[in-house]
Amino acid sequence: MFFPGRDQESICALATAQGLGALAIVRLSGPRALEIGRKIAPFLPIKVETHKAYLGKLVAKDGSAFDEALVTYFAHGKSFTGEETLEFSTHGSPVIVQMLLRVLIEAGAKSAEKGEFTFRAFMNGKLDLVQAESVLALIESQSSLSAKQALRQLKGDLSEELQSMESEITWSLAHIEAGIDFSQEGLETVSPAELLKRLGAVRERLQKRLASYRQGRVIKEGLRVVLMGRPNVGKSSLLNVLLEEDRAIVTEIPGTTRDLIEAPLLIGGIRVNLTDTAGLRESTDVVEKLGIERTHRASQDAELILFVIEAGHLQADEAEELHKKDLSKVILVVNKVDRVSDLGLERTQIIEKLHQFGLQAPEKMLFVSAFDKKKAFETVMGALQDWIRQAGLEDQTALFQARHFERLQLAEDNLGRGMQLVSEGVSPELAAFELKEALLCVQETLGVHYDDQILDRVFKEFCLGK
Ligand SMILES: Nc1nc2c(ncn2[C@@H]2O[C@H](COP(=O)(O)OP(=O)(O)OP(=O)(O)O)[C@@H](O)[C@H]2O)c(=O)[nH]1
Ligand SMILES: [Mg+2]
């Protein structure tokens, strides 16, 4: 069992970040929280009220005061963990925090393990597993949108939907089993058509959630955008423009960039992982060849490619490269337009040339000069923002955790097989078996059924104090 034999202990840890701060919060939770807390905060009244903060001096074992703090009391059942809890808001010096933790431990508390507060919340039914995971996601979120998603999940958005799926599958299962076992009474038999209708609706909802995983992953981990193209077209120059700093080396020598250069950006609440790559060309240089292999791999993984060409120089090998790409994920960036006098003509020529090479022009074409930094920045950023908006990432309640995706994918498979068996009408036992498996997967996602392995995977990623 996880945290074996510790549920009778009261645990304490720093809940805010390590280091200097204006304030620090130390949390104490467990059946003896108030009893232990009183030894350090003797000013707490005999009758404490839940959610009320009390101000006074914290004292060490010898009675000497070491800080003045605000102590908030949360009654059993009314706290994050579900246990009696005290929160000490002290002055934010690591020395005071260490002192407080030491005296709490001397008074009978135990030092909390990583994730133990959230684990207790889960064990006390305050959170299901999906919500516990969202606590972690919320702490780790690297953009406002991923924080919003995690918060939705914490509030129970996904949990509610899974619970409703759980009850729908249970309902169907009960009716199939009643049909198998005639001795069960009180349940009206339902037609296979009715069963299929209800199961089909659950399956559709599951499929919708599963389809949102790609977007969920993007929200959580960031949108992967790759700058690629021939050497010397200005990829690194554009990277620097977008980052507003001289991150990558730029020279007039083709083949300057040899490895991937990755840099994070925030655009419209979304984390964007921008990658500059080695220019594509036939090369005999070992290092450059390895770099180009990496370019190809990065472009395969990317959600979006900024394919950079040089104004007036579209070449056959570039068209060939574009040919291999899914053009819906390509924005064609025509750089060095400071060298052309007629942009309209340039556009027509590029489109014509692409046609000659048997290609449609990508829907999006941008004309920039990395030398005009402000305009280039606005043009490319604007296009990225449009792309993000069109992908509808902002209003998605997406599945973003791999564990949920795996489990629900299995549930969907089982449900599909179960429905097939119901429609064949040959073996209700087998149909029931498949539905039971589907039900189990949904319940495992929620943590209604769990084993140590699942808990271990979820809680070991937590930081101390959560
Ligand atoms: N005239 C003009 N020159 C540019 C522009 N952008 C980049 N350059 C120049 O083009 C050369 C190559 O620029 P880089 O940004 O290093 O090109 P790259 O695509 O990263 O090249 P590799 O790393 O070799 O693949 C440099 O001399 C830049 O100063 C532009 O908009 N106009
Ligand atoms: Mg470069």
Image (cartoon, rainbow, N blue to C red):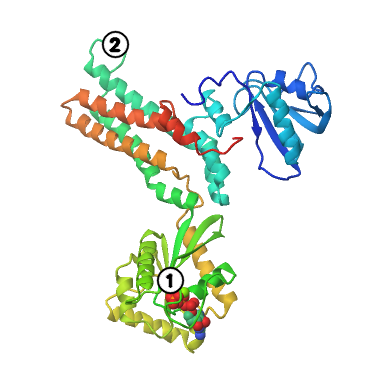
In the rendered structure, are the residues bearing label 1 and label 2 in contact, judged by CB atoms less than 8 Å apart? no
- The label on residue 299 is none
Q: Residue at x 45, y 73 (%)?
A: 257
Q: Amino acid at mark 2?
A: Glu
Percent across and percent down for residue 130 are: 47, 34
Q: Which residue is mark 1?
A: 258
Which is nearer the N-term, disc 1 or disc 2? 2
Residue at the image point whose x is 21% and y is 23% from the top: 429
Q: Is residue 73 visible?
A: no
**Residue 457, horizontal then vertical, whole percent:** 44, 35
Disc 2: which residue: 185
Q: In which quadrant of the rendered view does residue 307 lie? A: bottom left
Q: Residues within 10 Å of mark 2 (few under 14, many from 20)?
A: few
Residue 77, x across and y down, in percent: 62, 21
Judge whether 15 appears above or below 51 on screen.
Answer: below
Q: Quarter of the image containing the C terminus?
A: top right
Query: In the picture shown, does residue 49 fall above or below 344?
Result: above
Distance (Cα) linking label 1 and label 2:
73 Å
At label 1, which amino acid type do we have?
Arg
Ligand 1 near label 1 (Cβ, under 8 Å)?
Answer: yes
Vertical comparison of 110 with 246: above or below: above
Frontmost of labels 1 and 2 is 1
